[in-house]
Image: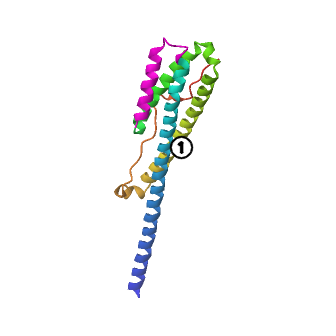
């Protein structure tokens, strides 16, 4: 009889451990997919912004033909943004893009007739909207990374999750936080 009780307790403990491992694995898979989805959202918004920039540049070019360096820096920043493959690369590209956008809006401020152009105003509005979406996507991504990293670091998960192939993810951090604190604006 004692033997059956011991075997029963061992079987119940094994079932509990199995259920815990199953639930933990599934929650980590869910969090991992959520982080991948959030990163995808960031790249979609960065691509949208990169697609808007040539139109904005064309709208400004007619008024500021001599500001060649500004347009070259925006084009270079756009290419860098499109080629970023990791949060760290995207962070560096984000710093360069913010600097380039400030330059192009400074050029726009020098030309009052450009500020009155309907095309320019529409492009500017879309760019500000995109910047807001990038910021929201970045927050969603970092929230997902936080949840995943916490789950991986929690005890007893930390004892076995790395063996299941789960690793901590990097946050989307920008070296110059002041550069992205708010979307670029044109002051009228």
Residue at image point 44% right, 65% down: 22
- Does residue 82 appear anywhere in the picture? yes
The residue singled out by tag 1 in the image is: 140
Location of residue 119 (image quadrant): top right
Residue at x 48% of width, y 13% of height = 67
Residue at the image position 64 percent from the left and 23 percent from the top? 118
Residue 84 lies, in percent from the top left, at: 40, 35
Give the percent coordinates (x, y) of residue 80: 41, 30
Asked whether residue 178 is in view, the answer is no
Image quarter where the C terminus lies is top right
The quarter of the image holding the N terminus is bottom left
- Residue 129 lies, with reference to residue 29, above or below; the image says above
Q: Quadrant of residue 77?
A: top left
Q: Position of residue 116 (x, y in %)?
A: 65, 18
x and y percent of residue 51 in the render?
A: 50, 32
Q: Secondary structure at mark 1?
A: helix
Going 52% across and 21% down the picture, which residue do you hit?
A: 58
Number of marks present in the image shown: 1
Q: Which sits in the foreground, 93 or 5? A: 93
Helix, strand or loop for the magenta stretch, by majority? helix
Please identify the residue farthest to the left as the structure is shown. 163
**Magenta range:** 61-84
Position of 11 relative to 176 (above/below):
below
Colour scheme shown: rainbow
Please tell me in which quadrant of the rendered image residue 120 appears: top right
User: Observer-nearest residue: 54 or 23?
Assistant: 54
């Amino acid at each position: 009889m004692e033997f059956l009780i011991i075997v029963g307790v061992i079987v119940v403990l094994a079932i509990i451990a199995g259920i815990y491992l199953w639930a933990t694995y599934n929650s980590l898979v869910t969090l991992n997919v959520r982080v991948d989805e959030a990163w995808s959202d960031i790249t979609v918004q960065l691509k949208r912004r990169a697609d808007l920039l040539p139109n904005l540049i064309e709208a400004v070019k007619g008024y500021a033909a001599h500001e060649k360096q500004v347009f070259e820096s925006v084009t270079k920043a756009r290419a860098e943004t499109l080629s970023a493959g990791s949060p760290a690369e995207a962070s560096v590209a984000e710093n360069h893009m913010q600097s380039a956008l400030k330059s192009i809006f400074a050029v726009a401020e020098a030309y009052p007739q450009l500020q009155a152009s309907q095309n320019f105003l529409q492009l500017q509005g879309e760019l500000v909207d995109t910047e807001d979406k990038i910021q929201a996507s970045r927050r969603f991504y970092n929230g997902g990374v936080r949840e995943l990293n916490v789950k991986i670091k929690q005890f007893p998960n930390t004892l076995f999750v790395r063996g299941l192939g789960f690793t901590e993810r990097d946050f989307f951090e920008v070296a110059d936080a002041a550069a992205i604190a708010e979307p670029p604006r044109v002051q009228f």
